Image (cartoon, coloured by chain):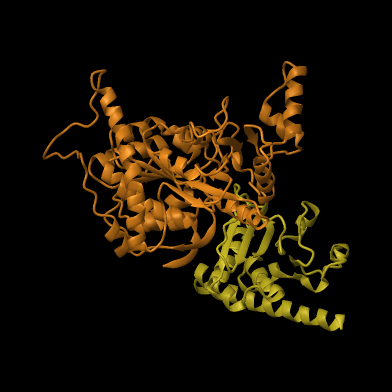
Chain colours: A yellow, B orange
Amino acid sequence: MFQIRVHGRGGQGVVTATEMLSVAAFEEGRHAQAFPSFGSERTGAPVVAFCRISDKEIRLREPIMEPDAIIIQDPTLLHQIDVFAGLKPDGYVLLNSHHSIEALGLAELVQGRRAERFCTLPATELGLKHVGRPIPNVPLLAGFAALSGTIRLESVVLAINERFTGKIADGNIAAATEAYLLVKQMMEGAHAKAN
Amino acid sequence: MLKQTEGSKAVAEAIALCRPEVICAYPISPQTHIVEALGEIVKSGELTPCEFINVESEFAAMSVAIGASAAGARAYTATASQGLLFMAEAVYNASGLGLPIVMTVANRAIGAPINIWNDHSDSLSQRDSGWMQLFAETNQEAVDLHIQAFRLAEELSMPIMVCMDGFILTHAFERVDIPSQAQVDAYLPPFEPRQVLDPAEPVSIGAMVGPEAFMEVRYLAHAKQMQAIERIPQLASEFREIFGRDSGGLIRTYCTEDADTIIIAMGSVLGTIKDTVDEMRAQGHKIGVLGIISYRPFPLEQVKAALLNCRRFVVLEKSLAVGMGGIVATDVRMAVTGTGLKGFTAIAGLGGRPITKASLHKLFREAKAETLPPVTFLDLDWDAVNKQLAREKQTRRSGPVAENILHDKGIVSAKFG
């Protein structure tokens, strides 16, 4: 079972992100369970949502405390809550920022872990560029697909088409595609550097 | 059709497939998404004839459901928590009058302190209201139980609550097979009321009944639920024939055949319990699970039969009979009277506190070793409790309890993330 935790703020589409992720996994014939951290939704307040993906029926209902991957939709949360709590030693981290992991002062976190599994993505900018709104959730989903290989970009596109229509769907697909390619490029760069 | 969808949305679609003629509801978390989705379905014209009635309160919601049902319409509503309490008088009237209303309870704690999260306090507070109560383990089962509920309610002319864990199920996206209209129509015949307010053949419903007849009317309500004990497994088996899956029934066992220890619970926590049991089985522990689907009527004989070969059991419940202990545990202990089985009660998950595998492992091991006290409060913060008790001993004006505990824990307000 692969477990993902998404951190963000109310209004950034955190819950929607995990729901779409579960739809993408379902489209690949897998079992998926998405659920929010259950609270009153308030714009700007820290929000957490979860997604489990498995080849078997998912019965577990506890919150995800030891995630395989963490997606952080708002870098200002780094100073507010322990977003990395419980991250598995070989886990993935995707952070919405136009700064690098090092520039964000996270080099220490990466130490002793698989550095190529840590990545930043200017997802808010991608949302603004393609959808006209600073909502980073969909670009981050596509970036997560590229980073972890857990789901395919095509499945993210299917999930987008299930949720949105018309221009909004098209914009989100464009944002997702660019995000996917950006993360792939960064991973190749990191791979080349490691070699 | 198999789809990945939200529990609330799946239930709304299932309700629509049951062709209700009147839907009335007042929104309250975590039930809101169900009635919102139904509102959209009715507005779109997909479900006709059906009237969606916006009411001013939960009391009005149940009152409208009573009126609609008495007029011969298939009536549905949904609520949770304080909403259920607010409609309590009408809840008793619905069952007392024998009106087959189906109501979803998106189970949520009852305040004060105000809390929107899941436990089973709300529907269990209506335990003796005369309504049947069926508990769903998954969103698939929530869908299926609603379809079975209309059939059972209308056959017996008694109302049913279908209980699903608030947020944990209502707000979870998972795969659900939504049946076809043809399947539901094959299972659920049109509503043929036992009593109906018809201007052409006037009758009155709701007579004043004195000491000479009240007990008989009450006994008949009990007799109906005893009939339901017979019918629920039959309806689950007919459901399997048409829909091709096991859903509903009175109880469900898991790995109980050779189990020396059996864990009993209701609702979605059964999933986490089963995962824990699998892990303990892999380590050689003979442990099993008994899920109670039908809380009212309570299947005393079936529970006893399922437990007869074990040595001890734990009732893990998301409810508390303040001043006594467990609510479900009391019923289970009644079921095993005279068997000499050792029973433990674990109160867990009140107000939405997560029930984790780690905590369950510890609890189940202590149960196996029989080192548990008769009543345990899972993951209770004893430091916080003792600090407040000490404060009350020291100071007369110790202040409001909830605010003190939040202050001690360094929480400014309830955490939302």
Q: Nearer the viewer, residue B266 or A136?
A: B266
In this figure, what is the number of numbered marks? 0
Q: Is residue A28 left or right of residue B363?
A: left
Whether residue A171 appears in this view of the structure is: no
In which quadrant of the rendered view does residue B399 lie?
Answer: top right
Picture residue at 62% right of the left edge, 62% below the top: A52
Task: Tell me residue B192's x, y (percent).
Answer: 21, 47
Residue B14, given in percent of the width and then of the height, sits at 38, 57
Q: Residue at point 81% right, 69% down?
A: A99
Q: Position of residue A96 (x, y in %)?
A: 73, 66
**In front: B78, or B96?**
B96
Left or right side of A6 for B133: left
Q: Is residue B136 above or below residue B44?
A: above
Q: Is residue B242 visible?
A: yes
Asked whether B93 or B276 is in front, the reply is B276
Task: Report x, y in % for residue A147.
Answer: 72, 74
Image quadrant for the N terminus of chain B? bottom left
**Residue found at the very far left of the displayed protein:** B200
Q: Residue A22, located in which quarter of the rendered image?
A: bottom right
Q: Is residue B51 left or right of residue B28?
A: left
| Identity of the residue drawn at 35% across and 47% down | B232
